[in-house]
Image: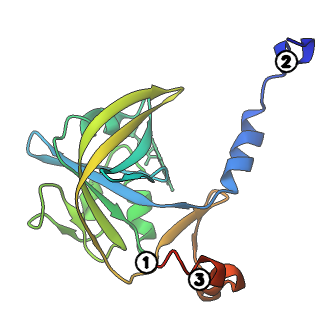
């Protein structure tokens, strides 16, 4: 092993944040019901993990007060926010307050609240929780999905953004025709 491999300088956290801020993410609210009360939090870390069997995942801060509650729920719903739902994003990114006063919620269609007019809904049941540094990862088995044509909300460089209409028709898209979604 070389000396340079063993004497790494500490990575500047603000550089890391800036670099990873260049990765545009979706914005979703994960909801569940715990002891009869709805619980929810905003996440930008939603990811597709497996299609067969269907599994999604996301990451929560290890110190997250809301995740400590959510992980007790047997069923979760991930509402993928549409571009008009910025207020819902910020409402569910707070620790306190009447979060479910933000947005319109359907509590009848599934075991966990669904955000009306979202881009997509993913119903799932938690299957694994694992430590990941200062976060914990959750994998969840997908039990049902629905989607709409509402354009998504995007998080990019620390701010909410919308997709520009032409972005969905980037010239290189013809090379991706095999992946028609
Ligand atoms: C766009 C956006 C994305 C976020 N993504 C995550 C995430 O992936 N994981 C996480 O733990 N918190 C994330 N947060 C922060 C939480 O939503 C928020 O801090 C939390 O729900 C409130 O604090 P608490 O969890 O301690 O109650 C995000 C916030 C915003 C605005």
Give residue 126's quadrant in the image.
Answer: top left
Q: Is residue 57 left or right of residue 20?
A: left
Question: Label 1: which residue?
Answer: 84
Labels 2 and 3: the sequence-earlier one: 2
Rendering coords of residue 85 (x, y %) = 41, 72
* In this view, the mark in front (1 or 2): 2
Q: Secondary structure at mark 3?
A: helix
> How many C-alpha atoms fall within 10 Å of the one at disc 1: few (<14), some, or many (≥20)?
some
Alpha carbon of mark 3 to alpha carbon of mark 1: how far? Answer: 18 Å
Q: Residue furthest front?
A: 178
Mark 3 vs 1: CB contact within 8 A: no
The answer for how far apart the CA atoms under marks 1 and 2 are is 48 Å
Give the side of residue 68 with respect to residue 82, left or right: left
Identify the residue position indicated by label 3 in the image. Answer: 168
At 78% from the left edge and 32% from the top edge, which residue is drawn? 12
Task: Report crowding for label 2: few under 14, some 14 to 19, many 20 or more residues within 10 A (C-alpha).
Answer: few
- On the image, numbered disc 2 is attached to which residue? 5
Q: Looking at the image, is mark 3 or mark 1 earlier in the sequence?
A: 1
Image quarter in which the C terminus is found: bottom left
Number of numbered discs present? 3
Q: How far across and how far down the image is residue 141, in percent?
A: 26, 47
Q: Secondary structure at mark 1?
A: loop
Q: Residues within 10 Å of mark 3 (few under 14, many from 20)?
A: few
Is there a contact, CB below 8 Å, between mark 1 and mark 2? no
Name which residue lies at 74% across and 48% down.
19
């Amino acid at each position: 092993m070389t000396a340079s491999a063993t004497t790494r300088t500490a990575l500047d956290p603000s550089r890391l944040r800036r670099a990873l801020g260049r990765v545009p993410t979706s914005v979703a609210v994960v909801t569940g019901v715990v002891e009869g009360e709805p619980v929810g939090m905003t996440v930008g870390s939603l990811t597709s993990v497996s299609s067969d069997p269907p599994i999604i995942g996301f990451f929560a801060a290890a110190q997250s007060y809301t995740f400590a509650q959510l992980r007790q729920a047997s069923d979760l719903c991930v509402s993928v926010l549409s571009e008009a739902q910025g207020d819902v994003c910020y409402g569910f990114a707070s620790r306190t307050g009447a979060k479910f006063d933000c947005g319109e919620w359907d509590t009848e269609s599934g075991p966990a609240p669904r955000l009306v007019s979202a881009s997509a809904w993913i119903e799932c049941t938690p299957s694994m929780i694992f430590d990941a540094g200062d976060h914990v990862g959750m994998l969840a088995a997908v039990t049902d999905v629905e989607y709409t044509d509402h354009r998504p909300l995007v998080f990019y460089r620390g701010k909410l953004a919308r997709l520009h209409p032409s972005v969905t028709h980037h010239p290189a898209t013809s090379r991706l025709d095999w992946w028609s979604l």
